[in-house]
Image (cartoon, coloured by chain):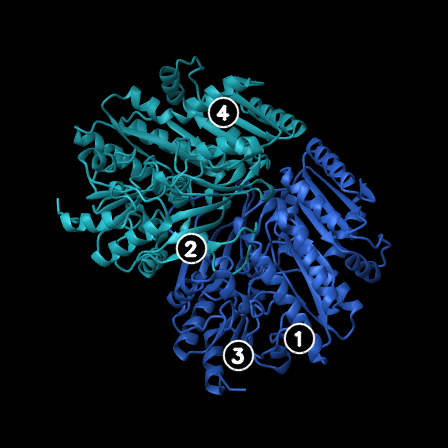
Chain colours: A blue, B cyan
Amino acid sequence: MHELIDEADFKELQALLADPARLVRSSSELALHAHDESPHPQHLPDAVAYPLDTPEISRLLCWAQAKKVPLTPWGAGTSLEGNPIPAHGGLVLDMRRMNKIINIRAEDLLVIVQPGLLHTELNQRLAKHGLFFPPDPGAPAALGGMMANNAAGIQATRYGASKRYLLALELVLPGGEVIRLGSQARFSSSGYNLKGLIAGSEGTLGVISELTLRLMGVPPEMAAAIVSFPDLQMAAATVVGIVQAGIAPAALELLDAGSIKAINAFKGLALEEKPTLFMEFHGNLAAVRAELAFAEERSRAQGALDFRSGLGRAERDRLWEARHQLYYAAAALNPGKRAIVTDVAVPISRLPQMIEFAGERLAQLGIQGPIVGHAGDGNFHVGLFYDPAAADELARAGEANAAIVKRALELGGTATGEHGVGLGKTQFMESEHGASLQLMRRLKGLFDPEGLMNPGKIFPA
Amino acid sequence: MHELIDEADFKELQALLADPARLVRSSSELALHAHDESPHPQHLPDAVAYPLDTPEISRLLCWAQAKKVPLTPWGAGTSLEGNPIPAHGGLVLDMRRMNKIINIRAEDLLVIVQPGLLHTELNQRLAKHGLFFPPDPGAPAALGGMMANNAAGIQATRYGASKRYLLALELVLPGGEVIRLGSQARFSSSGYNLKGLIAGSEGTLGVISELTLRLMGVPPEMAAAIVSFPDLQMAAATVVGIVQAGIAPAALELLDAGSIKAINAFKGLALEEKPTLFMEFHGNLAAVRAELAFAEERSRAQGALDFRSGLGRAERDRLWEARHQLYYAAAALNPGKRAIVTDVAVPISRLPQMIEFAGERLAQLGIQGPIVGHAGDGNFHVGLFYDPAAADELARAGEANAAIVKRALELGGTATGEHGVGLGKTQFMESEHGASLQLMRRLKGLFDPEGLMNPGKIFPA
């Protein structure tokens, strides 16, 4: 490997941090930052810094620019497309020690946080104020990483993705300049929407050093339902009917029979191994009851085998925990295998045909893989498992992945609903974005003319 | 005036349109496109084109770039900050003949439209599908202009501003290249969020030639309430209490006594001339009832003089129509005067002190002006009326405007919640955005290196 940070560089970098011990290059630290949860090729950084404040980040970015060393911000490492893998080596900025809540302003329904804070930790701290931050990608992700990837998750059907909750941010630009974007007001038409551009830019335009997030009041009532169907098409059609009626469940998750089997095995549950919807409804008591009744009527009209609501808190928590751990559950059923995880989203009416297409393609190619999705948003995932030692399996998984993305784009959809482009989806950017990809490249060049920020991501080589 | 489009140019431009009659320069046409509804200095364009399709727009932009002629897109001319005034002359592109609905995809809760369509016309056409496009700035604005200014309006408290409904758009770049941004999926993390950058860019980065908009289901129930208070502070405190409780009324409008007086006179109503809240609630019947009961309890606890709900459809329509026409109503009470309209937004808890500050400043400066706002979002407007013939009145209105914006920025707010920067707010951009304004300038240069697109807007000279 080309040595990008030599002994003298390492000493210079140490001097930029208040405590030199926060710059590390032990083999275990490097290995820890060589991969996320995706199967993409690992790549070691040359060193890892743990900054504690914005001036440290700024000095590191200034140094990296002067030395032309690649620099990749790191949240919690939970992403699924290689987004934080230091694909060109260089310096990783691990933000996890910048995990403070700076200010909870309950009276303004907002919070100011450092980017390394996990959304799960934030929500624990907010509970006593009756507030919460809705985006929930399942994994315990860092808020900076969630914003950088515009993470959505299971509650996006009702609450939208991370970007909607971004009031303001502090950003360190390549070269070290620190700027602030946005305000604490709930809406603004003042100048260009730069904060909305940083959301979803995957750390390729700068390093987020502080976030001001809009919060929601915890709804007075929450109710869940679990509904199983004879086939996946009926389940998908039920989702479409609920969304088309303008009902906005807090969650509307579709799991195929294979997914249920995986979580039964992994979590010791005894759910019926049929295509299943997990639903959740938020609001006042009366509203929740009315939405549950509507969802039940729709489900039964589509041929639901049962409709179980009125679940207790403990049972709901178990279901959602099982859903959140589905990736690990499916992996446990496929020992020694790895998975490409698709993330297409399509217009809601196209969801049944899209899922049917994916199922047929998997069958044709002889691939085992759970199908699961934030179906209320037309977004779903297929886990395409393959044996890393068997080149033909990887080839078939890649073929299925490409076919699913191609079909989604034909139906007016997108290659990635919530995981971001990272390394894995760069191959689809040309066909998804056409001429606007060139404009994106020019934008990248405006922020980062040396191409040092998280290189190798978003854009095909 | 410097002649930017001479006889030969005019003939060249005519040849770019399928029908040469769609290029005009009669004095009445030029005068019509010299002003919006703001008091900003009028400026005549040299010619006005009415394109009918994207290729025509593209040819016009290509020509303008080659000839270095300024070009300003025009929606319905209803903006309040001079946003579409051709401040540097040149060519105006009046989009109003591109007002078709291309495709209503009710099953996907989306619609594809041309940018000259008015939101009021769209909503009439959508009604039979049980769908609507929520942003409502009051005036019958064109959808392209609404998106270009990220218009919000009275329903933004619940539904958010225009940007939230932008799924995809077609954009003609300076020079004439046509690109498409976004997809028909309800969310995406694919590449840079360029569509969110175009929303709110006020026609300074290109011309929107097509929009794909997300729609909402018409809620099964709607209810309104009208509540009057002994003073403005009590009304503002009630708003804060409702928002802090996590209730999201569809509208939560605050009107001061002067505003009520103006609409009584203008519309022949007999509302009590006290600070008043207009509220609207959307949802299923049970949810609406519960929210109404909560709002009533909060209002009475804050000292409301009355709480009238259960209004019939006709009465509600009259109230909202009166609210929408407040600008004209206030103007009618101030014959011969013009008004600077402030548009600050602040964090919700700061709303009472911000409104108190504005009222005090008006009293000190001896200015009459209604205070009215989308209070649920911390956004409000003050109409600062002045006699155009009296230089001291204009100076005092300007002084009040600057003081109100300065205070809003100190409180963490923004100079403009929904009207956009246009000509009138350029003076505040440096203090609001600091170093990030320079980045916005560089972005502008990336899209429009010649500075021809709607020049004079957003950036201070």
> Residue at 53% of width from left, 60% of height from top?
B190
The answer as to whether the residues below labels 3 and 4 share one chain is: no
Q: What residue type is disc 2 on?
A: Leu
Q: Position of residue A75 (x, y in %)?
A: 58, 65
Q: What residue type is disc 3 on?
A: Gly
The answer as to whether the residues below labels 4 and 1 share one chain is: no
Residue that badge 4 annotates: B278
Residue A118 visible at all? yes
Residue A38 visible at all? no
Q: Residues within 10 Å of mark 2 (few under 14, many from 20)?
A: many
Mark toward the start of the polypeptide (2 vs 3): 3
Q: Residues within 10 Å of mark 3 (few under 14, many from 20)?
A: many
Residue that badge 3 annotates: A89
Residue that badge 2 annotates: A194
Q: Are marks 1 and 3 in contact (CB under 8 Å)?
A: no
Residue that badge 1 annotates: A395
Could you give the CA–CA distance between mark 1 and mark 3, rounded to whole angstroms?
A: 27 Å
For label 1, the SS is helix
Residue B287's place in the image compared with B207, above or below, is above
In the image, B181 versus A206, the foreground residue is B181
Mark toward the start of the polypeptide (1 vs 2): 2
For label 3, the SS is loop
Could you give the CA–CA distance between mark 2 and mark 3, rounded to whole angstroms?
A: 28 Å
In the image, B6 versus B264, the foreground residue is B6
Q: What residue type is disc 1 on?
A: Ala
Mark toward the start of the polypeptide (1 vs 3): 3
| Chain containing the residue with disc 2 | A
